[in-house]
Image (cartoon, rainbow, N blue to C red):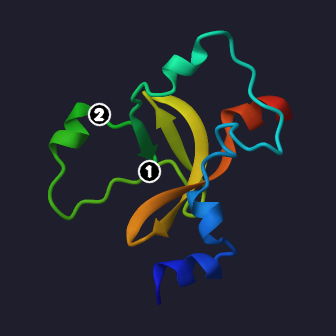
Amino acid sequence: MSNVQSAMDTGMNDMDMLDMGELFGDDQAQAPVKSGPGMAMFRDVPLTVTLEVASTEVTLGELSDAEAGDVLPLDKAVGEPLDVKVNGVLFAKAEVVMVNGKYGLKFVSTRREQKTDA
């Protein structure tokens, strides 16, 4: 099955997977994101985006006793959206998808949306 076909099976199309403009406020249909004078110069600042699957706390002793084949349970349920962090700060929740044979992220909510829901 092709990557595009598997994306279609999950109800997504190429535009959903690849169009990031709407997420970052570039979509003309949405109200533009307000920014102060000179903010345009920051658009090319590199950021580190990471996907955090889950986490857990263990003691140094537990970790030092770990061996190949041991399983460390994590704190996130299977199927729950994963945390997307930008420079270590929570930015969004997302699901992992395939895009042209590579992993991609489908955003299911952003911090901006979470703040307006509160």
Q: Nearer the viewer, mark 2 or mark 1?
A: 1
Which percent across, then down, holds residue 51? 44, 46
- Does 91 sit left or right of 55 as displayed? right
- Does 93 sit left or right of 49 as displayed? right
- Does 54 sit left or right of 23 as displayed? left
Residue 55 seen in the figure: no
Which percent across, then down, holds residue 116? 83, 31
Residue carrying label 1: 74
Q: Regarding mark 2 in the picture, which secondary structure is present there?
A: loop
Q: Quadrant of residue 80?
A: bottom right
Sequence-wise first label, 2 or 1? 2
- The amino acid sitting under disc 2 is Thr
Name the residue at 61% across, 46% down: 93
Which percent across, then down, holds residue 30? 82, 40
How crowded pointer 2 is (Cα within 10 Å; few <14, some 14-19, many 20+) is rated as: few
In terms of depth relative to the viewer, which is nearer, 76 or 38? 38
Name the residue at 57% across, 20% down: 40
- The amino acid sitting under disc 1 is Leu
Residue carrying label 2: 59
